[in-house]
């Protein structure tokens, strides 16, 4: 979803924040941060829900590309971050990209807006 959103905005930076919860593991989630630091634009919420609930990821992605007139050849830019709370083990190396490791939503928003 973050890649599609970035491509739809001509490659502008989108933040993808993996959040942890103090509640059960299934309450963990993902936030998308738009280029001005806001959460994902409301018009994309339904698109995100459709993609997450799809049983055919390829068809769902192709549908989004078509509906949103996305040029698949546009380069996407996505900063990935994770919550500082260690809630479940698979978060370990999930967000290690080169030498960049973003730890909180504020850092992710800061990087996206720069």
Image (spheres, rainbow, N blue to C red):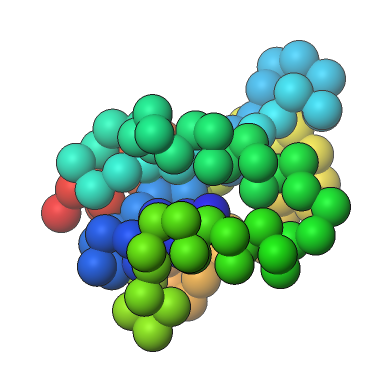
Residue that extends furthest to the bottom in the rendered view of this protein = 73
In this picture, is 114 found above or below 84?
Answer: below
Q: Quadrant of residue 41?
A: top left
Q: Quadrant of residue 52?
A: top right
Tell me residue 92's x, y (percent): 71, 55
Residue at screen point 58% across, 60% down: 63
In this picture, is 56 found above or below 28?
Answer: below
Image quadrant occupied by the C terminus: bottom left
The one of 13 and 106 positioned closer to us in this rendering: 13
Q: Give the side of residue 50 with respect to residue 2, left or right.
A: right
Residue at screen point 69% across, 36% down: 86
Tell me residue 38's x, y (percent): 28, 32
Tell me residue 111's x, y (percent): 26, 52
The one of 44 and 16 positioned closer to us in this rendering: 44
Residue at screen point 57% across, 41% down: 48
Q: Is residue 75 visible?
A: no
């Amino acid at each position: 979803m973050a890649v599609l959103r970035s491509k739809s905005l001509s490659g502008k930076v989108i933040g993808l924040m993996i959040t942890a919860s103090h509640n059960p593991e299934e309450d963990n989630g993902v936030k998308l941060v738009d280029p001005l630091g806001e959460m994902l634009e409301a018009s994309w919420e339904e698109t995100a829900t459709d993609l997450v609930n799809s049983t055919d990821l390829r068809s769902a992605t192709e549908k989004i590309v078509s509906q949103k007139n996305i040029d698949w050849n546009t380069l996407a830019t996505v900063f990935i971050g994770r919550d500082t709370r260690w809630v479940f083990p698979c978060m370990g190396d999930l967000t290690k990209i080169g030498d960049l490791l973003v730890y909180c939503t504020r850092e992710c928003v800061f990087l996206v807006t720069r």
